[in-house]
């Protein structure tokens, strides 16, 4: 039984991501926890204390719970899947704190969230919430671009930074995913100028050892920024999902905040699946 955490702020973007997940896992037995985090910044502490503050707090919780229950009923009605169960979760914590609490208490296998661009922001590819989840929540995370209609992830792209290794639990988890859902895995090994990568030498050995019965393509890309390579590759190949093996914050920053990224796109073209090493 899969334990999947679905994040929602009741926006069309977040609900679209939920629909993607329910389509993706339609053959699996799944417990879905639908989490809404009510930002405490929206309410002054005095607002919750003055005038019988507890009743105000209860009113806020009741309103959010009713919206969650309505969303869950809509999901049940739309998908009619007896393999699915749903549970609403409401929290007043910060987003990453709330996610980490649910992840631990419910033994979450995957987090699903929507994302859209933030025009003019440093983190142009994703809103800051998405970046914070990737950085601070160590759990596989699926991010679905705004307005992306479900397509089975038959061809998956995996860009590899200089130090990313295929001999890792993160890559093993990705292989489990691709072997179940996909027909082909595209691997791009990125090599900056004047760099020597031990992992480049190891790739052939690890590919031979770990990739069984799955079609794959392997390319070495030299002296080209990763964000540019990923953008071009997804436009010229039938890629339906991109994966990342996140090890270091510097790599996340390098991929998501590169200045060239804003010149190409302000949002993902396909869903992104992140695994942490």
Image (cartoon, rainbow, N blue to C red):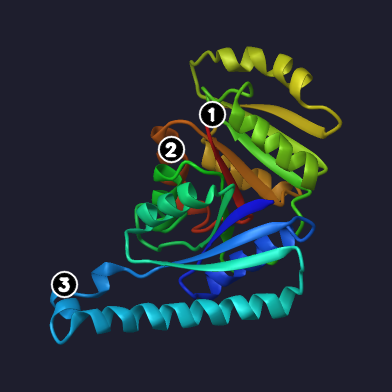
Residue 113 rendering spot, x and y as whole percentages? 53, 59
Q: CA distance from mark 1 to mark 3?
A: 45 Å
Q: Is residue 177 or residue 216 the one in the foreground?
A: 177
| For marks 1 and 2 on the same chain, the one whose residue lies earlier in the sequence | 1
Q: Which residue is mark 1?
A: 161
**Is residue 245 depicted above or below 14 in this figure?**
above
Q: Which mark is residue 254?
A: 2
Residue found 79% across the figure and 49% down from its top: 154
Q: CA distance from mark 3 to mark 2?
A: 38 Å
| For marks 1 and 3 on the same chain, the one whose residue lies earlier in the sequence | 3
Residue 60 rendering spot, x and y as whole percentages? 34, 80
Residue 23 rendering spot, x and y as whole percentages? 73, 63
The answer to whether 265 appears left or right of 155 in the picture is left
Q: Report the residue that reaches farthest toward the right.
A: 213
Q: CA distance from mark 1 to mark 2?
A: 10 Å
Q: Which mark is residue 45?
A: 3
The answer to whether 8 appears left or right of 80 in the picture is left
| For marks 3 and 2 on the same chain, the one whose residue lies earlier in the sequence | 3
Displayed quadrant of residue 167: top right
- Residue 188: in sight, yes or no? no
Residue 139 rendering spot, x and y as whole percentages? 52, 43
The answer to whether 184 appears left or right of 51 in the picture is right
**Is residue 153 depicted above or below 224 in this figure?**
below
């Amino acid at each position: 039984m899969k334990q999947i955490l679905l994040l929602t702020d009741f926006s069309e973007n977040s609900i679209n991501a939920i629909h993607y997940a329910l389509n993706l896992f339609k053959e699996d037995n799944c417990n879905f926890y639908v989490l809404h985090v009510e930002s405490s910044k929206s309410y002054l502490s005095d607002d919750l204390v003055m005038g019988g503050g507890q009743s105000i707090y209860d009113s806020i919780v009741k309103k959010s719970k009713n919206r969650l229950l309505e969303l869950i009923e809509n999901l049940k009605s739309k998908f009619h899947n007896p393999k699915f169960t749903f549970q609403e979760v409401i929290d007043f914590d910060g987003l990453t704190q709330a996610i980490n609490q649910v992840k631990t208490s419910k033994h979450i296998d995957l987090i699903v969230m929507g994302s859209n661009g933030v025009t003019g922001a440093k983190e142009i590819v994703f809103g800051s919430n998405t970046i914070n989840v990737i950085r601070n929540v160590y759990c596989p995370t699926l991010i679905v671009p705004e307005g992306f209609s479900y397509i089975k992830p038959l061809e998956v792209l995996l860009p590899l930074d200089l130090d990313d290794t295929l001999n890792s639990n993160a890559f093993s988890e990705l292989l489990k995913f691709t072997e179940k859902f996909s027909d082909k895995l595209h691997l791009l090994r990125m090599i900056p100028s004047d760099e020597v990568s031990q992992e480049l030498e190891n790739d052939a050995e690890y590919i031979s050892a770990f990739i069984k019965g799955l079609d794959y393509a392997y390319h070495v890309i030299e002296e080209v920024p990763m964000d540019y390579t990923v953008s071009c590759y997804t436009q010229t190949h039938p890629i339906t999902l991109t994966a990342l093996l996140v090890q270091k914050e510097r790599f996340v920053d390098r991929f998501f905040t590169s200045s060239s990224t804003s010149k190409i796109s302000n949002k993902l073209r396909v869903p992104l699946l992140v695994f942490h090493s």
